[in-house]
Image (cartoon, helix red, strand yellow):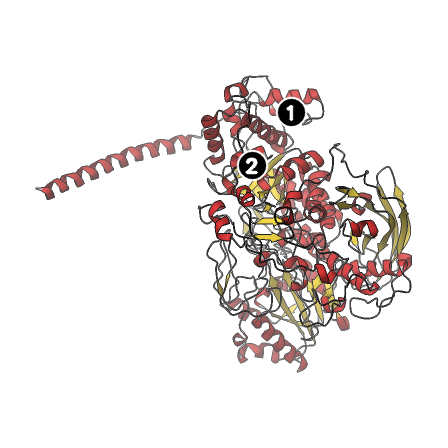
Amino acid sequence: MQKKLVEAGFDQTIQEEIEGAVLLKNENNALPLDKSSERISFFGHASVDPIHKGNSAGVDPMEGYRLNFPDAMRMSGFTLNEELVRHLEASPTTRAKSNYFWMDCTNATNGIADGEDKIEYYTPEIRQTWESERGGTAIMVLTRCGQENYDMLIDNVAGFVKGDGMMDPPKDQGHKTGRSSLALIDEEIAILEMIKEAKDAGYFDKFIVLLNTGNTMEVNWLDKYGVDACVYTGLIGGVGALGTAQLLAGEANFSGKSVDTYAYDSLSAPAVVNANENSPVYTNGDAVEAAVIGTQSPFADTGRYFTFQAEGIYVGYKYYETRYEDYVLGQGNADSTAGARSGMSEWNYNNEVSYPFGYGLSYTSFSQTLDDVKYNAETDKFEATVTVKNTGSVAGKSVIQLYAQTPYGEYERENLVEKSAIQLVGFDKTDMLEPGEDQTMTVEAERYLLASYDYTNAKTYILSEGDYYLAIGDDAHDALNNIICAKQPDAQGLVNVDGTAATGDADKTYKFTYDTLDDKTYSTTETGAEVTNRFDNCDLNYWVEGAGTYLSRQDWEGTYPVKLSNVTATADMIEILAGHNYTKPEGAPTVAEATEGFGTDSGLKLVDMRNISYDGSLEDIELWSKFINQLTFDEMLNVLDDAQGNAWAANEKIAAPAMKLGDGVDGPNGTSIGFPYEDTTGKYGSGKVDNASMCCFTGKAVLTGTFNRDLYAERGRLIGEFGLWGGKQMFWTLGVDYHKTPFGGRNFEYCSEDSNLSYMALVPEAIEMEKKGVICVAKHAAGNDQETIRIGIATFFNEQGWREGSLRASEGALRVADIKGYMQNYQRLGLESTMNSDAFNIDVCMDEWGFRGYAITDCTNARLDGYQGDYIDQLVSGTDGFCMTNAQIAKQTVLDYVNKTDDGSIVEYVVNAAKDYYYALSRSNAINGFDSNTEIIKLTPWWQTALTAAIVVTAVLTAGSVAMLTWTVIRNKKKEVK
């Protein structure tokens, strides 16, 4: 059974790669390759040292099952230039590495994950390995991947040193290259030129590039270097390269779609202007930092930096495609130079976008017909019936992408309600279709996703008055062309991705009209909570009038973001930034009054609470109160600290087992299943592993790019199954943020640049994981938009951009999937940290979304100062637990506070935290097999007793030795005095 589980994980990883890898370019039928006649020469150090997983918490692939690209191609039957592979393996080049918290920023690769050989390494001897025979295929592998604590560099430099503090941006040493870290570096350019020269000389027939990236690289250079085919492989997990090999051989067909826009220049994204290492500094930054900064290195808080999300909703394709429509229709000054790629005389789509969101080629072709669209009032969903036919010559799968355009009229312009010209609202994927075979499917779209948030007037979600369009298309750009064709048939200037003239297809659209604006339908949620402005004070203009302008399609030129350089933090701002703002309420009960009745045995055990709702009825509320009140106040406090990320202790009194956890998006760490594994067939790798572990799956963008809900669900099911075998009850594993910019250090943990796709894609995985009794914890909810200077950076935004962006990305998991846990992040929402944001934790998560479960901070590292050590404020704001606080620092802080102030109101928040913890635990596999008669007995193993005794004896002997040493020193000193 254990062997089957491990191999099911391998099969899932391979299938994720098969269906999530994206064929971006394939000219002259360069792919698929012929195993029998094509010799493969690999280039790029990443070919032998690829990125399997991003650099954050998570499981590493098992030894022997950590395949690179030559391994996989060799196992699949390809003939390789083995001598060249050996030279690459022998190269002294190493990719910039880091441990969990530190990045080496001193080497030539600038700390980005591209460690590439210098062109001088390719000596005449090495070149002879491919010049000795003509023909064959060159494959170059490129890598890029950010990491925890560090984003990819917006302005790459040829040399730099770390900033003064851990969280400060790198110091520029005056060697800027003028390129971002998502562009090619000099070493890569030299190798590409070498391969092109070899191909032109006849040494290679084909040139293939593989993008083994966690961040979306720029690929505007493919034609320049004669690249015939380009494949996005993403992060390949342990054995995912076997899926890549099957695709290259034509044994499997490409069906993945891009989850991000491939911009010609990544710096053209408006979200980049005031973010990442471009984050602005207050003019009085020193004063701010003096008031708010903590002192415990390496976790010193960021005080002087802030970020202003002037882009609003215009992130990724929602910017590029919206500006494209306005360019075509001649409105909003869309053709101005503002935001245009450097050196361009005007903004033009084909100068800005290499490949759009949702793009991906196949070895076959498909036709898609929009047969019908109906609105189902009972489910509040649109149902689009689509027929897909394989019109090509090989079998394949096709992704149906359903997009929407909503009205942008006078009301929206007057009230600053921004509208994307196109947005994904639904998707599905066909079965494997043979040539000539068709399949009719129904794609659902929640009408809720067509609503827009009006933060200036209605202060809730609205369905605008006017014409709506639903459309299918091969990608976001294709769908938008179809809509433009439908609503303005005589529109001129439509273009395809490759720059050729486009016509659009109105038959692939569906139009409906609302005669009046609706500001009621989504003004409340299913919990009955009002949906209204919660984050007004997160707008920089709330504090400093006229400080910043938000991007609007009314005037692309006049509102395009500029770097803020003249913002002074006010005294009120500094006071809030400093934190520790909680004060004892007037009339608060004493601690004795608040804890009266605690420790009263009601005969209830945790298993008795398994089917008791959190607050579904008064009876259930009272039952939970009786259950929790069996604990003493001291016992309740034990749920606050997570014991260095390993476990929470058992409680014998209520028969509550310990809770153990794992951490990591592409496969949680610390999840050994307790059995050996060996593949004797050579199908997945080789070698015996004494204690098999959780599978290392592909990167999140690869999984998301499959557009296959069955694969999403299977990932969740397998992680849950590994959790059962590994004795884990909680996994911090669901990456719920989105790619705010292409440079995000942890983009590899999150689904996409599209918050709607994140909203939809995370639900199946979360549901299946929790079906296995593993608490699925979302991280990092919400707004973990950058890693550089992340500790305490103030993030300013307007509520429409926030709700339709970061909040939407987290909403699917927390509201729809109803998971039982989420991890917060380090950034501030406005001036308040996510950890002590009432608006986020209480008003939105609990009240609007109905979240019931355990909310935990990101790693605090046992902070006692700075905003991370603000345990009282965070507890009051809905935070239940504190990550890696060690030695029960949070518990002791609360005890010290209540002992000093006799503030019994804090007791209520501790009770809530205990209830949240045990509610989540009662829904986990921790109580599998338990009944009301089950007891937990704490036993001390004999060896632990013996070890303790040995320690005591050693301590006594040591004490004696110290005494003798002290006596000797004293005697000697006395002698010296004499």
Q: Is residue 365 above or below residue 936?
A: below
Quadrant of the snapshot with the N terminus: top right
**Residue at mark 1:** 609
Rendered location of residue 299, percent (x, y): 48, 48
Residue at the farthest bottom position: 201
Residue at the farthest front position: 545
Rendered location of residue 72, percent (x, y): 63, 61
The quadrant holding residue 526 is: top right
Q: Is residue 500 above or below residue 890?
A: below
> In the picture provided, is 568 more to the left or to the right than 706?
left
Query: Which mark, residue 874?
Result: 2
Q: Is residue 149 above or below residue 203?
A: above
What element does badge 1 sit on?
helix
What element does badge 2 sit on?
helix
Q: Indicate the amino acid at tag 1.
A: Met
Label 1 and label 2: CA atoms lie apart by: 27 Å
Q: Residue at x 18, y 37 (%)?
A: 967
Rendered location of residue 158, percent (x, y): 52, 69
Q: Is residue 804 above or below residue 603?
A: below
Query: Which mark, residue 761?
Result: none
Quadrant of the snapshot with the C terminus: top left
Tell which tag, 1 or 2, sits nearer the viewer.
Answer: 2
> In the picture provided, is 297 more to the left or to the right than 958?
right
Q: Is residue 226 visible?
A: yes
